[in-house]
Amino acid sequence: MTAAPVLVILSAATALGLYLLLLVLRGERKQGLVALHLLLGFGGLETLVMLLHGTPDGATAAGSLSFGKVAAGLFAVSAFSGFIAALARRSPVAANVLLGTHVTVGLAGFALVLAWVTAT
């Protein structure tokens, strides 16, 4: 399995997430795009984990797996904080802190995936 599907899905999720951040800063919210961002994010995390585990024929991903494992962990934390931020609508301050955590940790995970792919 190559890293191309992982990069495509995670790039789409990141680009859509940055667009959603722009909408939040404008005071808008589009539920359909949020759902698509959620699906792309979880799909990207799943394909990343599949790539880390290797293919059924026994081939593993080349290079150091540490960046990939840390990126998968960061994406899991980002997904959890994004989910909790969506539930924290009653407290705007808590929701904004969680959203900031979601964005920061997600971008850090994306940067690590890019570093991992370019190192292989």
Image: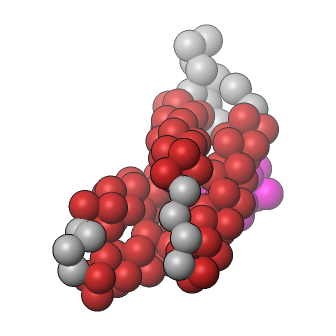
Q: Report which quarter residue 82 is drawn in.
A: bottom left
113 versus 44 height, above or below? below
- Location of residue 41 in the rendering, given as x and y in whole percent from the top left corner: 53, 47
**Residue at position x 55%, y 70% from top?**
28
Q: Report which quarter residue 85 is drawn in.
A: bottom left
Q: What is the number of callouts on the image?
A: 0
**Residue at position x 60%, y 81% from top?**
26
Q: Is residue 120 visible?
A: yes
Q: Is residue 119 found inside the magenta-colored segment of the image?
A: yes
For this orientation, the residue located farthest to the front is: 28
Judged by its main secondary structure, the magenta piece is helix
48 versus 119 height, above or below? above
72 versus 109 height, above or below? above
Q: Quadrant of the N terminus?
A: top right
- Location of residue 60 in the rendering, given as x and y in whole percent from the top left corner: 61, 30
Q: How is the image coloured?
A: secondary structure
Q: Which residue is at the front of the view, 118 or 77?
A: 77
For this orientation, the residue located farthest to the left is: 90
**Residue at position x 78%, y 38% from top?**
4
- Location of residue 68 in the rendering, given as x and y in whole percent from the top left corner: 55, 52
Q: Is residue 58 found inside the magenta-colored segment of the image?
A: no
Q: Which residues are magenta?
A: 113-120
- Location of residue 34 in the rendering, given as x and y in whole percent from the top left corner: 51, 52
Q: Is residue 63 visible?
A: no
Q: Is residue 8 left or right of residue 70?
A: right
**Residue at position x 68%, y 42% from top?**
9
Q: Which residue is at the front of the view, 85 or 29?
A: 29
For this orientation, the residue located farthest to the top is: 57
Q: Which residue is at the front of the view, 98 or 69?
A: 98
